[in-house]
Image: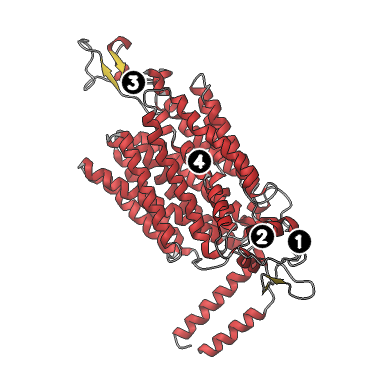
Amino acid sequence: MMADDTQSLLSQIDSVPVPVPVPVPTEEVVPLLGKHISSLNDAIEDCMGSFGWNQFLQALLVSLAWVFDAQQTFISVFAEAAPAWHCIDDHELCNSGTIIQCQLPKTAWAWDQPAETCLISEWNLECAGPFVSGLPASSFFFGCLMGGIVLATLADSSLGRKNMLLLSCLVMSLAGVLNVFSPNIWVYSALRFVTGFGRATIGTCALVLSTELVGKKWRGQVGILGFFCFTIGFLSLPAMAYLNKDSSWRRLYLWTSIPAILYSTIVHFMVQESPRWLFIQGRKEEAIEVLRSMSTSLNFNFADDALLMDKETWNVDLYSGLKLLWQKGWAFRRLSSVMIAGFGIGMVYYGMPLSLGNLKFNLYLSVTLNALSELPASLITFFLIGKLNRRSAVLVFTIVSGVCSILCVVVVDKGLQIWMELVSFFSACTAFNVLLIYTLELFPTCVRNSGLSMVRQALVLGGVISPVLVAAGRKNEFWSFGVFGLVIGCCGFIVVCLPETRGGSFCDTIDEQEYMDIKASVVTACLAGCDNGV
């Protein structure tokens, strides 16, 4: 097939009506911003294609949720860390270099800091065993897993992106405040479960909402803005913990939870809902008002009947989105592939900070270095997301992370070991960022939040398993760093079966996504035929 034939075929494809309930003009095409608009995607691009100050403010406000998300995710590194202890001078039974702490009487040793600085020392859990001492961290990640499953589709169905973000932040922050009054490890673990349950959808809602408020040109950059905020939240923790090192661990929860409650109030009054979600819910007037307020044009003349779209008829109950992702073969293949990749990435992303104590490195310094490594990962993704092939980037960074993680077991020198750990964590962070942007582009608006939620649950599932490996790695580093490397390397290979999405437009309905996929496959086949002289 020659080039002219290819163009002819493409013209025929473009002439076929899209079999979806896309916005349609009633009698004539209505001018919007001086242009003719015939689809919702065109309206979004014309109204918000340019990046104005209003859009920047909205994106920034939504992305700030990641700051508090990061703080509650990694606060256990300091609040639940095993504190240092020392032998009391001249005690005949005590030698901290050769004697196990739990084999000594209480009169033979003492904590290096006041007992209330850590819950392990305050509640005398130094000899409680790995199950009890590790229960809060496991409860938090299990809460994340359950929250993601239960709340996964609320942002796509009844609540919407904004209200789901508000509810998640409130539940997470209120549970954090209640942690201050925990009388024992059991109540504390239960509240950590509630904290994880609440924060499960924060990153998903923030990422989806911020990217749906801008045109496709700025989609990647706005998505990465949330990752920057997550890095800021992660970086703030060692600084806050260091300033609080001689005070109660309860104060650290107050410092992180109260600002999150104030932020939730700001979200309620200042953040806009996604116009894409409003349209597919049949709330046309509200969507038009959002487009009007977000438009970068000074000559906005959007008639109320410019776009007509009925509410999606299939979305009749809470889990319709997940059912659809399961029933559609192409959607299930995409979802299962990105979830497998997410599981491997999540194991390293959440497991590496927890395993830093196994390297016998300064805890404050090592956590700070790991948090700082997220900054270049976000910068690389921010500046190169428009040029990076999503599939290739995820594949390369997962392989690099896996190799460096395994090298942490092989390398003997502690200085070189921490560098290998940093490179592995940096690569996992970059793969994490790209995978979330990739997932956004793989699914249409009507199930986008549901699909992204399931991928985040796969990431969290890796986090649920990682503390067990970290505990085993205290005796043999292979069970932490070695397993981390093997899992992320193998799971990353699954993305080779996914389509490339760089430069594509958001689709809003399932049928529209299927139409665009068919069109893309035909175009690819035609171009391949031309290259082969067919």
Name the residue at 36% across, 50% down.
426
* Dot in front, 1 or 3: 3
* Residue carrying label 1: 310
Above or below — where is 88 with respect to 432?
above
Q: CA distance from mark 4 to mark 1?
A: 35 Å
Tags 1 and 2 in contact by the CB under 8 Å rule?
Answer: no
Residue at the spot 25% in from the left edge and 13% down from the top edge: 88
Q: Which residue is mark 2?
A: 291
Front-most of 304 and 219?
A: 304
Q: Nearer the viewer, mark 4 or mark 2?
A: 2
Q: Which residue is mark 3?
A: 113
Q: Nearer the viewer, mark 4 or mark 1?
A: 4
Q: Amino acid at mark 1?
A: Asp
**Residue 436 visible in the picture:** no
CA separation, marks 4 and 2? Answer: 29 Å
| Dot 4 amino acid type | Asp
Between marks 1 and 3, how big is the CA–CA gap?
63 Å
> In this image, 309 relative to 100: left or right?
right
Query: For the residue carrying disc 2, how many other residues have a C-alpha within 10 Å: few (<14), some (14-19), or many (20+)?
Result: many
SS assignment at label 1: loop
**What amino acid is labelled 2 in the image?**
Leu
Q: What's the CA distance linking mark 3 and mark 4?
A: 28 Å
Q: Helix, strand, or loop for circle 3?
A: loop
**Residue at (64% x, 43% y) in the render:** 268
Q: Which mark is residue 69?
A: 4
Of the residues tagged 3 and 2, which is closer to the observer?
A: 2
Q: Position of residue 523 (x, y in %)?
A: 54, 78
Query: How busy is the neighbourhood of tag 1: few (under 14 within 10 Å), some, or many (20 plus)?
Result: some
